[in-house]
Image (cartoon, rainbow, N blue to C red):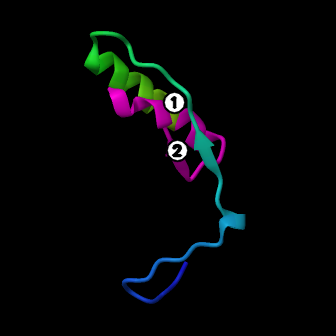
Amino acid sequence: MSANPGKFTYDAADMSIAIVQAGTVIYDTPATLDKLERLTKEAASHGAKLVVFPGIDRY
């Protein structure tokens, strides 16, 4: 990472990213958020530093 405030750089070779395809729990927002939290923690336990949920934008 850069020490220069206002400018952020990161060596991608050192970063693990998880892209998760997960559906919502229909008509149950709290259950959906619990599911996303569980999946985020699982990805982090496998070394992910960034977790992305590309299909949740419709939620």
In the rendering, at what x and y percent does residue 2 appear? 52, 83
Instruction: Quadrant for the C terminus, please.
Output: top left
For label 2, the crowd category at 10 Å Cα-Cα, with few meaning under 14, some 14 to 19 and many 20 or more, is some
**Residue 39 circle label:** 1
On screen, 51 above or below 34?
below
In the image, what residue occupies the spot 46% across and 19% down?
23
Could you say whether the residue bearing mark 2 is in a helix, strand or loop? strand
> Which residue appears farthest toward the right when viewing the image?
13
In the rendering, at what x and y percent does residue 12 appear? 66, 66
On screen, 23 above or below 2?
above
In the rendering, at what x and y percent does residue 55 appear? 46, 30
| Foreground: disc 2 or disc 1 | 2
In the rendering, at what x and y percent does residue 45 appear? 60, 40
For label 1, the crowd category at 10 Å Cα-Cα, with few meaning under 14, some 14 to 19 and many 20 or more, is some
**Residue 51 circle label:** 2
Along the line of sight, the residue nearer the viewer: 16 or 38:
16
> Which residue appears farthest toward the top when viewing the image?
27
**Residue 48 circle label:** none
Span of residues in magenta = 41-59
Along the line of sight, the residue nearer the viewer: 10 or 47:
10
Q: Is residue 13 left or right of residue 44?
A: right
Contact (Cβ within 8 Å) of mark 2 with mark 1 = yes
> Which amino acid type is marked by label 1?
Leu
Q: How many marks?
A: 2
